Image (cartoon, rainbow, N blue to C red):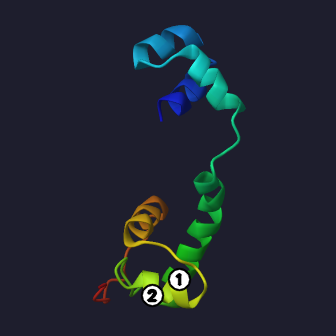
Amino acid sequence: MKYSVIEQMRQEYPVPPMCRLLGVSASGYYAWRKRSPSLRAQQEPRLEAEVLAAHQRTRESFGPERLPKHLDEHGVRLGVHRIKRLRKKLGLRCGRNASCH
């Protein structure tokens, strides 16, 4: 998270002072820039699409507690907490008239 803040602001401010301010090493920041995205980060766009598709298939009536079973039936295994995080990121909520369990 701190490295991404530095990355966003590096055109406006020098990197070493920002690293000191945020309590990280400059060498760590530069190593982070060269590193390829983690497996979890690589999976994120596909999982977002899967959660969005499941949300639409269930007519916006399934909450995060019911979605894991529905997703599993479509070959996608996700835990409740990850589904909650992805739904929040995507701004998904149950429909107005849904019970949303």
Q: How far from the left and from the top, in percent, is residue 62?
A: 39, 85
Q: Is residue 1 left or right of residue 11?
A: left
Crowd band around label 2 with a 10 angstrom C-alpha radius: few (<14), some (14–19), many (20+):
some
Q: Which residue is mark 2?
A: 69
Q: Which residue is mark 1?
A: 54
Which of the 4 image quarters holds residue 21?
Answer: top left
Q: Are marks 2 and 1 in contact (CB under 8 Å)?
A: no
Q: How far from the left and from the top, in percent, is residue 31?
A: 65, 26
Q: Earlier in the sequence, mark 2 or mark 1?
A: 1
Which residue: 58% across, 55% down?
A: 40
Which residue: 61% across, 71% down?
A: 49
Q: As rendered, which of 72 and 63 lies closer to the eye?
A: 72
Gap in Å between the C-alphas at discs 2 and 1? 11 Å
Q: Is residue 81 left or right of residue 71?
A: left
Which residue: 58% across, 29% down?
A: 8
Q: As rendered, which of 94 and 15 lies closer to the eye?
A: 15
Say what secondary structure mark 1 lies in: helix
Q: Is residue 12 visible?
A: no
Note whether 25 is above or below 73 in the view shown.
above
Type of amino acid under label 1: Ala
Which of the 4 image quarters holds residue 50?
Answer: bottom right
Q: Is residue 46 visible?
A: yes
Q: How far from the left and from the top, in percent, is residue 18?
A: 49, 14
Q: Is residue 97 left or right of residue 1?
A: left
Which of the 4 image quarters holds residue 32?
Answer: top right
Type of amino acid under label 2: Lys
Say what secondary structure mark 2 lies in: helix
Q: Please tell me whether mark 2 or mark 1 is closer to you in this view.
A: 2
